[in-house]
Amino acid sequence: MAMNSTGRPTAPADAQSTAQDVDTFSGSRGLLQAEPLLFEVGAADKCGVDLPDVPEHTSRLGGLERSEAIGLSGLSEPEAMRHYVRLSQRNYAIDLGLYPLGSCTMKHNPRLNEKLARLAGFADVHPLQPQSTVQGALALMGELSHWLCAITGMDAVALSPKAGAHGEWCGMMCIRAALQERGELSTRRRVLVPQSAHGTNPATAAECGFDIDELPADATGRVDMDVFRSKIGPDVAAVMLTNPNTCGLFERDIREIADLVHEAGGYFYCDGANLNAIMGKTRVRDLGVDAMHINLHKTFSTPHGGGGPGAGPVVLSKRLSQFAPVPYLVQDGDAWRLVEDDAQAEEKPFGRMCAFHGQMGMFTRALAYMMSHGADGLRQVSEDAVLNANYLLARLKGEMSPAFDGVCMHEALFDDTFLKNTDVTTLDFSKAMIDEGYHPMTMYFPLVVHGAMLIEPTETESKESLDRFADTLLSLAVAAKSGSSDRFVSAPVLAPLQRLDETQAARQPVLRWREA
Ligand SMILES: *Cc1c(COP(=O)(O)O)cnc(C)c1O
């Protein structure tokens, strides 16, 4: 068996041979069906629907139309159904089990949300319909805006960003527009970003043309205030800070950070991805925030993962709201209206971020979630999320090593100290969790903690579910420390694909199917 320098099998097939596995004649395993790619199972001459012949017509493509079929693979309806159901069975999902991916808030998605999102008046409207025919949908967006502003205490919200990262870009573009108006864009070049930040923060600031200046963490996992004070100055455009931060800790000095950056003439961008820990407990406005994105797909339970649509509305302070992008929503008496272009705008929008107004389906789900919980329910969501994370922290800290002392917010962070002198790494430990039926936690993030393991259970796990998960992790930790590295080095051996060469997958990804 081919092993790499750290003693791990280098290819799935090698790992498989250690799995005491049997080969089946069909390629299926138990009731888990083998399934090739769509291009391999289908045929170009098959079709699941009967379409009428195209009537006589005159082409307006000026001779550029295709003359041959494009060769897309066709399937009958039952074949298409089986193809996707088989693939789905190889996937992990929040509807299957606990999904402890830190910083992602993988909570249960209530079915009520789905029911409401499928109402024809929300699901079947078209963004190019006359606005008079979609007043209900616009009113829903207005109601959602109201809830987002009430939860955060902020003055305005831009709804169109389609993900957290997109929202960061929206907020930083508002800051950029404000600096431009002040004539300070060329002199305020620096954006301060903690080393623990999500990678999208520095990427966003760089995309907006700023220079990144990193802020180290202190021994408690929070912004090192001495360094922060020394870095603040007249060339600072903004600070981007996540609160609670990605170590799962509340930035206690956040007021002082906001005051210092404001005194220096800069802006405070808050990354709101971790709102699930503080919603209904702390008002973002009171923390001195100028702009913050909210991941509806995290905090407000709209389904995510696997590349599905997200929604990253940005709440803005009064001095930034005038720069919010078009389209934006205004209410004239009882009627709602989308301001579509800069010429119509009374404010000073920095531009347009996407073709239309944002993700209607996610707006509907998020509002359904908010209204079904109510203000008290949303506060309890945060309390329970923090309670669940601390329950896991307390249960696990005997065998695993918390990265920082004390209680956490909505996620518990461990480092790899407990694996010291074992043959097991954070990667091996995470892969072994797959054999135990769990999606791994977020690993090697945040970067400020060695071999980080970031666990976010969310509030929707029961005590029984948390206990089963904790029991499994404790058993794995004990196994690793007692020297039984076998179950780790080749893991996962029970998953459809075994240990992959992740370096090769990242460096030489195969993104295109070619006929063999
Ligand atoms: C998830 C996340 C983001 C990015 O959000 P997307 O919706 O994935 O683009 C940014 N910052 C933090 C801290 C996050 O957890």
Image: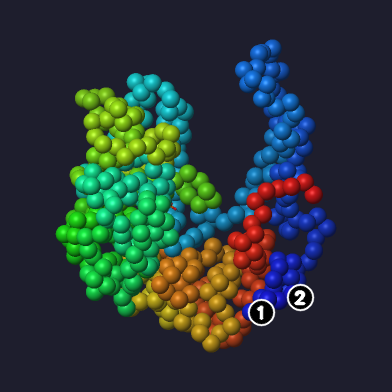
Q: Position of residue 21 (x, y in %)?
A: 75, 68
> Taking 84 as reference, is 457 left or right?
left
Q: Does residue 59 show up?
A: yes
- Residue at screen point 37% across, 68% down: 195
Residue nearest the observer in this picture, 380 or 45: 45
- Residue at screen point 27% across, 56% down: 188
Q: Classify 84 as above or below 356.
A: below
Give the residue type that dot 2 points to. Met
Q: Classify 45 as above or below 441.
A: above
* Image depth: mark 1 or mark 2 in front: 1
Give the residue type that dot 1 points to. Ser
Q: Which mark is residue 170?
A: none
Q: Which mark is residue 1?
A: 2
Q: Classify 82 as above or below 266.
A: above
Q: Residues within 10 Å of mark 2 (few under 14, many from 20)?
A: few
Ligand 1's quadrant: bottom left
Q: CA distance from mark 1 to mark 2?
A: 13 Å
Image quadrant of residue 233?
A: bottom left
**Which image quadrant: the N terminus?**
bottom right
Q: How is the image coloured?
A: rainbow
Q: Secondary structure at mark 2?
A: loop
Q: Are marks 1 and 2 in contact (CB under 8 Å)?
A: no
Q: What residue did someone put label 1 on?
A: 5
Q: Secondary structure at mark 1?
A: loop
Q: Does residue 414 show up?
A: no
> Taking 481 as reference, is 11 left or right?
right
> Taking 81 as reference, is 469 left or right?
left
